[in-house]
Image (cartoon, rainbow, N blue to C red):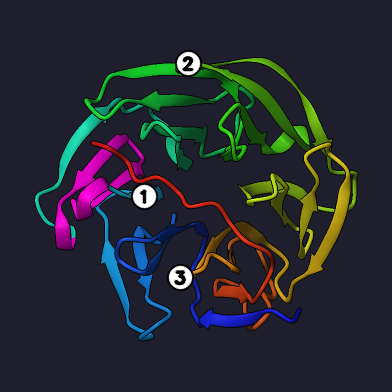
Amino acid sequence: MRPQVAVRAEATLGEGPTWDAEAGRLIWVDILGSRVHTYEPATGRRTVMATEQHVGAAKPRAGGAGLVVNLRDGIGLYGPGGKDFRWLHRDPVPGRRGNDAAVAPDGSLWAGSMAYDETPGGGNLLRIAPDGATTEILGDVTVSNGTGWSPDGTLMYYVDTPTRRIDVFDVEGQQVVRRREFAAVEEGAGHPDGLTVDADGCVWVALWDGSALRRYTPSGALDRVVELPVKRPTACAFGGADLTDLYVTSARVGLDTPSPYAGSLLVLRDMGRGLAQPAFEG
């Protein structure tokens, strides 16, 4: 399937596509551009909202209550229409910013961070409950990236990009245990970035500097590679009314001669079926 351009853009660091089923729209961010984008496939309507800090991720809140965002200095909440901002968890650390995030099946937010200069161990992965209670799930993280859960919620997949691995954990209540390698990306194929899990339990991952998406079966076997017209795809998510379209964000940052599509939102039609993503319950 040939990728199509859903939204032609020049995002510096496009990231975090998320299907908001209640609103019928895709949400994605330009981290370094401090922008939250939305796109409604049924109408073509687009919106862009500026944030006061670099924004690593934006996810819908339950009941159409707005957005939860992973910012430079912590986790914030926006009301409908980008109004009434307030901090839910604020913990500024010089030289650190929020990066990718995901909503767990229980409605909590799992938000990662990283040092701007990618200092090894400069980031972490936090669980933020709807009431703002925060637990550190992982420390000593370098570039916290893709996070997702198996269809039955018993496994969590996770990427710390410089490790070149997708790791998998067993889920026990609000914690994850028994970390082990699920799949590794070989030298020269790019670096694993954002991921999503489909209804068959397969894990799709974007390969930064790899110009491709990969799909791994639940056993960790590579069974599909989809080439893309961008060098730095960053993340992927299923969307559309039936969750069969796979959306891919991309970046231009650091490229001397980016392709014409770098920074755009791409879409691949009829790529299987995704899982309905929960909204943040806060």
Residue at position x 32%, y 41% in the image? 280
Question: x, y (%) of residue 204?
Answer: 70, 52
Question: Which quadrant holds residue 282?
Answer: top left
Q: Which residue is mark 3?
A: 241
Report crowding for label 3: few under 14, some 14 to 19, many 20 or more residues within 10 A (C-alpha): few
Question: x, y (%) of residue 180?
Answer: 76, 21
Q: Which residue is mark 1?
A: 59
* Of labels 1 and 2, the one closer to you: 2
Question: x, y (%) of residue 62?
Answer: 26, 46
Instruction: State how far apart marks 1 and 2 are (Cα).
Output: 22 Å
Question: x, y (%) of residue 21?
Answer: 37, 61
For residue 173, the mark is 2
- Say which amino acid is labelled 1: Lys
* Of labels 1 and 3, the one closer to you: 3
Tell which circle, 3 or 2, labels the residue nearer the N-terminal end: 2
Tell which circle, 1 or 2, labels the residue nearer the N-terminal end: 1
